Image: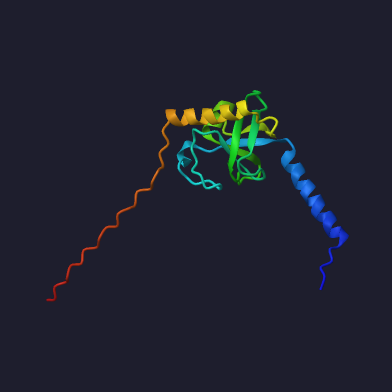
């Protein structure tokens, strides 16, 4: 029994690969919001814990670890973030950035702002830029020690087992 692959099947696979690659490579424009500080310590999709002092983001399509250049269209301010989560879950939003990135972009006051997103390619991520981004995140961590919020277990009140006296 031989496996026969239809030519149109190969064409569909090739087309889908090119289409997905095109989506990831293109610049995007839309609205951005931010994660609040209160979510610090919660697990992200990538498994790492959210830290509001790191420059991270949530995007639906880009692979984990992709560096993005996010530009606030109104002010022209740029920030570089790393994708480590999936979202946002509201269809009108394109990206969720961490609190520090939102502060740098000027989103904190308004809550939502129009942004332009450009993925950084290998040529853009030269050794100097990548080392700068990693150093910035490590310096921020030293300034603001990261603590994981552990939910305190609620103590259950023990019901007193009093024997009822029979009369």
Query: Which residue occupies the foreground of this view, 63 or 70?
Result: 63
Of all residues shown, which one is farthest toward the left?
167
Of all residues shown, which one is farthest toward the front?
1
Q: Residue 21's spot in the image, x, y percent?
A: 75, 44
Give the vertical position of 86 relative to 12 (above or below): above
Q: Looking at the image, which residue is at 49% across and 31% down?
A: 138
Give the vertical position of 87 relative to 135 (above or below): below
Query: Which residue occupies the foreground of this view, 47 or 96?
Result: 47
Whether residue 5 can be seen here = yes
Q: Looking at the image, which residue is at 21% across and 63% down?
A: 160
Count of numbered circles in the view:
0
Whether residue 108 can be seen here = no
Q: Would residue 165 be found to the left or right of residue 1 on screen? A: left
Q: Residue 71's spot in the image, x, y percent?
A: 65, 28
Q: Would residue 166 be found to the left or right of residue 137 on screen? A: left
Q: Quadrant of the C terminus?
A: bottom left
Query: Which residue occupies the foreground of this view, 74 or 3?
Result: 3
Q: Which of the 4 image quarters holds residue 29?
A: top right
Q: Residue 146's spot in the image, x, y percent?
A: 42, 36
Q: Quadrant of the N terminus?
A: bottom right
Of all residues shown, which one is farthest toward the bottom?
167
Q: Would residue 54 be found to the left or right of residue 77 on screen? A: left
Q: Which colouring convention does the figure follow?
A: rainbow
Of all residues shown, which one is farthest toward the right?
7
């Amino acid at each position: 029994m031989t496996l026969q692959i239809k030519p149109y099947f190969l064409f569909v696979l090739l087309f889908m690969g090119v289409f997905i690659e095109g989506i990831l490579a293109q610049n995007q424009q839309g609205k951005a919001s931010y994660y609040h500080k209160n979510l610090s310590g919660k697990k992200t999709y990538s498994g790492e814990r959210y830290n509001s002092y790191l420059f991270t983001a949530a995007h639906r399509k880009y692979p984990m670890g992709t560096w993005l250049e996010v530009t606030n269209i109104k002010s022209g301010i740029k920030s570089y973030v790393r994708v480590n989560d999936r979202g946002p879950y509201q269809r009108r939003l394109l990206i969720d950035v961490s609190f520090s990135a939102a502060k740098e972009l000027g989103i904190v006051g308004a809550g939502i702002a129009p942004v332009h997103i450009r993925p950084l390619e290998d040529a853009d991520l030269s050794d100097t830029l990548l080392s700068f981004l990693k150093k910035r995140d490590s310096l921020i961590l030293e300034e603001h020690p990261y603590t994981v919020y552990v939910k305190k277990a609620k103590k259950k009140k023990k019901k007193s087992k009093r024997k009822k006296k029979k009369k």
